[in-house]
Amino acid sequence: MSRSGLVTQAVARRSASKLLKNPGPGLPPLLIPLFMFAAVAGALSSIDVGYYNYTAFTFVFVVYMGAMFVGVFTGIEIAGDFGTGIGARLMLAAPRRMAIIGGYVVMSFVRGLIAVVVIGGIAVATGMPIRGGVLDMLGLVALALLLNVATTLYGAGMALRVQSAGGGVLIFIPVFMVMLLTPAFVPRDLLDGWLHTAASINPLTPAMEAGRDFMANTSANLGLAFGATAGLVAVFLLWAFTGMRKAERGPSEPRRRRRRPGPQTS
Amino acid sequence: MVIPNVIFPLFMLAVLSKAGDQATKIPHFPTKSYLTFVLGATMVQGATSAATLAGGMLAEDMEGGFMSRLLLTPVRQAVLIIAQLAGVAIVGFVQSGIFLGIGLAFGATVKAGVGGALVLLAVAVLLVLTFGAIGLMVGAMAGSTAQVQALTGLFVALMFMSSMLMPRNLIAHDWFKTIATYNPISYLVEATRSLLIEGWDGEALALGCGIAAIGLVLALTVATLSLRRTLERT
């Protein structure tokens, strides 16, 4: 295995062993979407959205949220690691520094898959009907995992720039906001005004609508959904890459005021 | 501090008021404006941030040893707790005023009139004090900012599992209606909402303010006792 491959593997294993020793930080990306699922499906199911089942309608949003929140929390982990100096030590061992990010992405991908399976399992166990077949479900999982990778890369890019766990809010809030600017609770046709416009230009919307088509076994615009999601992965890969370049250069020198010579005292 | 406490609840208000418009078409929905409906919940959501604000400050002072140094002075623990709350109450009052002002500017109405709007602000300050006291209680008991931060997730979950998005009588699922009925946040939301969409509803106000007042007294008592115990140990 190449040196970069070994670095990626080591970072992923370190991340996994940290999570196994202390599973607490792994719970929020799973619990927040599940609470959201229960709350939205429970409270808003009286709304007629023209879909076969409101729980199934909400499920797509929740399953994407689970996959993406794993990416968000991985970003916060990276920010913490670079804030405490572990990132700098990892960089000393890695000839290609993006291999470090690769390790985090691999671990986030595995955790994202677990989140999708757990949320899906709970939804099915509580009686959510699915009209789509196996291929449809694989399509939904593939979109969720692509979103997981895109979010992890976004989180990594931000983490490498802020290099402090306190900057976690800059990773979490924008992702949550962009998620809510999709047709999250009702279809796009039923939205109006600025939210309709925002949802129409939001790159997550095609994935959201395709996911619902997969669930309902209706025709989906797969090209647009996978194209937009893969585009997000490409953009955030560049974002993470430039973030790593900034981290390699190290913190910029603080501007120092030139001291003027004061009056001499004798 | 500005982003989570003000911008985020306002963003949620903007999105939910648009996305939830369809709910107003449900028969017997109490208002035609989902913005007005959800404005009360936004004020409660803003008030919950007082917990992390007050509790975080106390825990930070305890972690840094500042509280231990204060113990050397003749100041009483209860005074320390109340002083922390006073600052949070002012922030909460301004924050609630911003939520109400922006809500009204975008078309929300207060059925109870100008007097109702003033009472709404007073209720919001009471809620800020209650959540601030809960934050102080957790901060005094745990002495750790990380544990105080965990309250954010708990309150977000409790908010969404309440009658925040739909009146309890219109919730279709019985299991969710039961959770919302036993969730005290529902009554806080309903107290603020009653002034906005129903006018003067004594029962809703009494329930909401009563729960908030009981929570405030309990949390303050536990916070003072815990602070004394924690500081005696250090």
Image (tube, coloured by chain):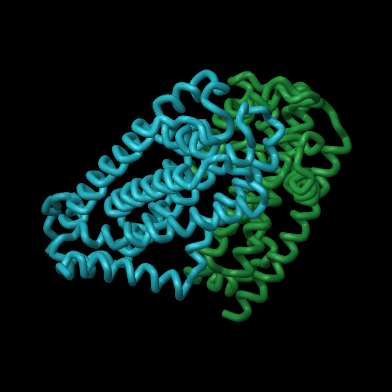
Chain colours: A cyan, B green
On the question of residue A157 being in view, the answer is yes
Q: Which residue lies at the image location 57% right of the left edge and 61% below the top edge?
A: B148
| Residue B36 percent location from the top left of the image | 68, 26
| Residue B123 percent location from the top left of the image | 74, 39
Left or right of A234? Residue B114 is right
Q: Which residue lies at the image location 48% right of the left edge and 63% below the top edge?
A: A26
B55 or B22, which is in the foreground? B22
- Please identify the quadrant where the C terminus of chain A is shown: bottom left
- Please identify the quadrant where the N terminus of chain A is shown: bottom left
Q: Which residue lies at the image location 55% right of the left edge and 36% below the top edge?
A: A216
Left or right of A252? Residue A214 is right
A11 or A59, which is in the foreground? A59
Looking at the image, the residue that sits furthest to the bottom is B233
| Residue B166 percent location from the top left of the image | 72, 35
Left or right of A265? Residue B172 is right
Residue B129, compared with residue B9, is above or below; it is below
Residue B109 quadrant: top right
Residue B172, compared with residue B33, is above or below; it is below
